[in-house]
Image (cartoon, helix red, strand yellow):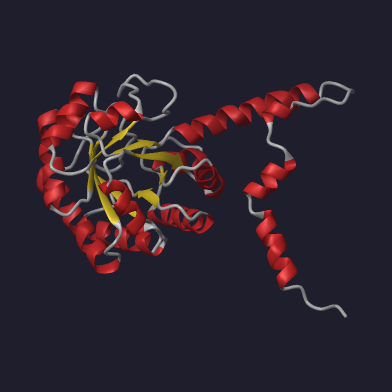
Amino acid sequence: MYGRQRLAEMIAEPEITVVPGVYDGISARLVEQQGFETGFLSGAGVSNSRLAQPDVGFLTLPDVADQSREIADAVDIPIWVDADTGYGNAVNVHRTVRKLANAGAAAVMIEDQEWPKRCGHMAGKSVVPFDEAVTKIEAAADARDEHAPNMLLKARTDATEPDGLDEAIRRLNAFADAGADVVFADALRSADDIRRVAADVDAPLSVNMGFGVRSRPTTPLIPAARLEEMGVAVVIYPRLITAAATAGMKRGLEELATAVETREEYEAPDAVVDWDTYTDLIGKPAVDDLEGRFRADSG
């Protein structure tokens, strides 16, 4: 159901699982059409695109559950869902996992930041105490086992910046013991840090490569093939598609500004997809087929 078993099988394979970020139905469908086998509903992507706000804790559970439901309905690939801190204490985490399971999530990610959380690559992060963090993962695992046994649980720590790499590793191992299927230390600062976490944590490791095709001042940009050699099981690219969409929209508007300043016909075909490509992407042929099958006989 919802590709959960398929996702678990991907993680179990020796090849690294590549997970582009998505933030709405059309971005998820593009990921699927380009041949990627899974997508990651980025909390930052939803906050940026839906609210035009940074990833600093403005999203709520209803925001994420609604977006998850629409995306899961739009594609056949399994979708990981970023549930931030679970929107409260361990009891809230339990409810969050149930709600997102019902919304079609194939995997749910819970992190250990204090609320309001912030993007893992922003300064000023802080994490909840160790015991509280572990208890929240235990609650998430309990909800998973009760309501969606095949759904994966991803546990994230942001402890590296405030408390050091040793503490991040301690937390990840505790999260795995508490029932997490995949673990994730965000904003690791070097390839050596990634290698050490992969070697010292007894669970499949996920890392964040941000834009994927452009470097950032935090985690270095490392190709997926090299990450696989370093022992990484999953790599996510949560910032790629929102940044690429922003670049595309900006380019289109710049072309429009040029077009409205001239009396001559002006076209910029490289700035937009053609009509048939776009209508195919949004499922118009399938709607046409349904209309043909269920048209009332006018005769």
Q: Quadrant of the C terminus?
A: bottom right
Q: Nearer the viewer, residue 34 or 274?
A: 34
Which x, y percent locates residue 189?
A: 24, 23
Q: Nearer the viewer, residue 30 or 24?
A: 30
Q: Is residue 88 visible?
A: yes
Q: Quadrant of the N terminus?
A: bottom left
Which residue corresponds to the image point at 36% horizontal and 55% vertical from the top-left?
6
**Residue 171 vs residue 59: left or right?**
left
Classify 86 as above or below 195.
Answer: below
Classify 249 as above or below 22.
Answer: above
Which x, y percent locates residue 257?
A: 74, 24
Which residue corresponds to the image point at 24% horizontal and 63% vertical from the top-left?
143
**Residue 114 vs residue 241: left or right?**
left
Which x, y percent locates residue 281?
A: 63, 47
Hey, which residue is sitting farthest front in the picture? 14
**Residue 240 vs residue 161: left or right?**
right
Hey, which residue is sitting farthest bottom in the picture? 299
Quadrant in the picture for residue 120: top left
Classify 95 as above or below 23.
Answer: below
In this rendering, the count of numbered labels is 0
Q: Nearer the viewer, residue 165 or 50?
A: 165
Which x, y percent locates residue 216?
A: 37, 21
Which residue corresponds to the image point at 18% horizontal and 27% vertical from the top-left?
195
Q: Is residue 122 visible?
A: no
